[in-house]
Image (cartoon, rainbow, N blue to C red):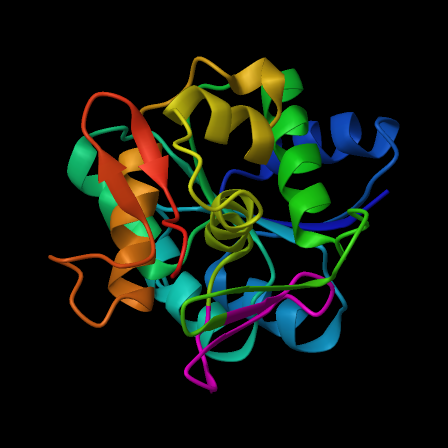
Amino acid sequence: MARLLVIDDDRSLIELLSDYLTRAGHEVIGAPDGQRGLAVVAEAALDLILLDVTMPGLDGWQTLARIRAVSTVPVIMLTARGDEMEILRGFAAGADDYVTKPFSFAQLAARIKAISERAAPDRHEGSTVLRGADLEVDTVRHRVLRSGQPVALTPTEFAILVTLLREPGRVMSARHIVAAVWGPEFMEETGYIRRYVWHLRQKLEVDAGRPRYIVNERGVGYVFPRQG
């Protein structure tokens, strides 16, 4: 189903994850540190990376920065810390999701499936190019242009933008956005939406403090306003 790279200094965890995910139909490559993980990134076509934060030598943050310099492959961060600043740091660095250890392998497999699907070419019926204000979003090529200039988004940020842009003027609750982007089984996990929207605004908006594209309707949700 997908070619996955697991970068973690815990070799036992790599073996257990590899066994579980292989039985789920994935191809899994293991790397015990950041340097060897980066070598795999340079040589192999990957669909998703599972990246541990705390590793000796090149840690997860440094590894992620180097991955993002050359690739937009989706990355799920694995960490023993689940505090607010740690999670925000991951999103700011370009992570697509964040899983706190210890975690359920079944839950992780579900997150891998959700991210892989939203990173794949869009098969949604209708136009593959969405437009709003001075944004142009190609859902097949996963390309975003603002006033003709490319904007680099992670697959998760891209999926949130497309969800809102498909129905301009409709205010969507956090639960609705989570269900559309991650899947209905994650509908109650709305805590990250505010953080994702914050980072998305930093990339899209000319003035993130006065957003034009993703507007918050207090107590209700988010909307991409109709133009004109």
Q: Residue at x 27, y 36 (%)?
A: 194
Say which residue appears at 67% left-offset and 27% top-offset.
109
Where does the magenta region start and end? 136-152
Residue 226: x and y, percent?
Answer: 41, 52
**Which quadrant does the N terminus fall into?**
top right
Q: Nearer the viewer, residue 1 or 30?
A: 1
- Residue located at (48% from left, 44% from top): 164
Residue located farthest toward the bottom when viewing the structure as drawn: 148
Q: Nearer the viewer, residue 164 or 202?
A: 164
> Would residue 145 be visible to someone looking at this image?
yes
Based on the displayed image, in which of its 4 quarters is residue 216 positioned?
Answer: top left
Which of these two is toward me, 171 or 198? 171
Where's the C terminus, which quadrant? bottom left
Question: Is residue 39 shown above or below 187?
Answer: below
- Looking at the image, the residue that sits furthest to the left is 209
- 74 lies left or right of 128: left
Does the stretch in magenta take in 125?
A: no
Residue 59 visible in rendering: no
Q: How many marks?
A: 0
Residue 143, horizontal then vertical, whole percent: 59, 71
Q: Position of residue 71 (x, y in %)?
A: 57, 72
Residue at 44% x, 19% y is 102
Provide residue 204's location: percent of width, then percent of height.
Answer: 33, 66
Taking the image as shown, residue 181 lies to the left or right of residue 197, namely: right
Asked if 27 appears above or below 176 in the picture, the reply is below
Question: Is 60 in front, or is 112?
Answer: 112
Instruction: Report which quarter residue 110 is drawn in.
Output: top right
228 versus 69 height, above or below: above
Res. 65 image quadrant: bottom left
